[in-house]
Image: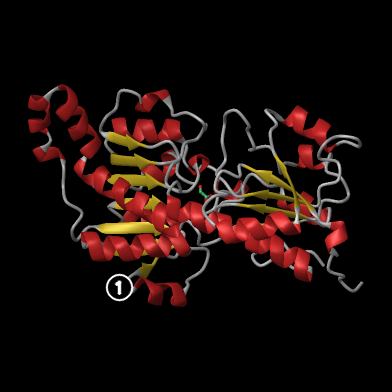
Amino acid sequence: MEFKPLTPLSKPTVLLVHGDTRTIRHEQWNRVQQKFNILTYDCIDADEFCKRLAPGGTYCNINAIVRTGWRKAEPYASHFLYTAEVAKHYPPSLKLIVSSGHGHDEADMDTLTRMGIWYCNTPDTCTEAVANTALYLILSAYRHFTFAEYCARNDWALSRSLGMKTVDPLGSMLGIVGLGDIGTSIARKAALGLGMKLCYFNRRRDVERERQVGADISYCESLAELLKNSDCVVLACPYTASTHHMLSTKEFALAKEGGMRIVNIARGRLIDEAALLQAIKDERVTGVGLDVHENEPGINEGWSGDYMATVLPHIGVCSKTSWDGFEKGCWDNAEAFFDTGKPLTPVNSIV
Ligand SMILES: O=CC(=O)O
């Protein structure tokens, strides 16, 4: 069937979720306000959202969901928006979902595709922010700056014990799991900024990505090979059923003599945290930097008093640089879809 652009009389209705970035791009915001009827998301849980989607509810005619801001817990949670359970309640008018960020593990892609709904993320909009966070966590996993900061605030003398426990990353091997946009940027920064050697593991070798790194980087045929070779492992890969707990007891047991450091800026459930805490006790892991956690929101209580680990509240992505990219990436997709019938950066494909 030929795609007919919608006339101004039939403005598409867009549900805007977490639109707190809307003041960044004035021109585009003014334009999309003309093009679309924009409703603002304000549900506190999945039940309320499903009620609003039902016939007669305020969201019963939406054509698109656009989440330009970052996922929040309070007061309007949004982690459940794209699950199979909730998708059952979507009105037939819903054809497009655009959601800021890289990861799309919250969306049941098979269900959305079966329902004929395009799902887009905003790739490469937060690469700089997340790669910078990874660099911070790598450095901290070697130099234990979180412990040092604790000492500066609480017990200066205690900090003197740090010298023999910390090392500089110069010349040591960084193993990157997932050489996508973010993994590539981490590799470049770690080689240039910290003088680290590099290796990586992907489902397959990617010579073009290796070239983009601009420094020597060797490919490992398996995760086990990467773990055996690395002094520090950084996870920058997607979370799926097959990558669940990709680092657990068996994997930590492959650490080199002297232990390895673990950094995660991807998704918390890639790591079995109980096994990680045990691996620290067993001295197989000697430094930890986590921006993401197995049970978010919140951190494992094992980290609460452990200032040798650096833990952040999934803020790697949070910078105005990313917010600007999110805002643009989301609205560019919505505008392209309603102008031409095709979004710009779909994760799935609707025929
Ligand atoms: O967590 C960050 C992202 O998925 O972009």
Label 1 neighbour load within 10 Å: few <14, some 14-19, many 20+: few
Residue 124 visible here: yes
Report whether 34 appears left or right of 26: right
Q: Secondary structure at mark 1?
A: loop
* Residue visible at 87% across and 70% down in the picture: 4
Q: Which residue is mark 1?
A: 216
Report whether 182 appears left or right of 46: left
Q: Nearer the viewer, residue 171 or 17?
A: 17
Give the position of the C terminus as an image quadrant.
bottom right
Colour convention of the picture: secondary structure
When asked about the image quadrant of residue 148, the answer is top left
Q: Position of residue 306 (x, y in %)?
A: 29, 27
Could you tell me the amino acid type at mark 1? Asp
* Residue visible at 82% across and 51% down in the picture: 94
35 is higher (above) or lower (below) than 14: below
Q: Nearer the viewer, residue 47 or 4?
A: 4
Q: Nearer the viewer, residue 47 or 295?
A: 47
Report whether 121 appears left or right of 117: left
Q: Position of residue 27 (x, y in %)?
A: 58, 61
Q: Position of residue 159 (x, y in %)?
A: 11, 31
351 is higher (above) or lower (below) than 127: below
Report whether 175 appears left or right of 84: left
When asked about the image quadrant of residue 218, the answer is bottom left
Residue 222 visible here: no
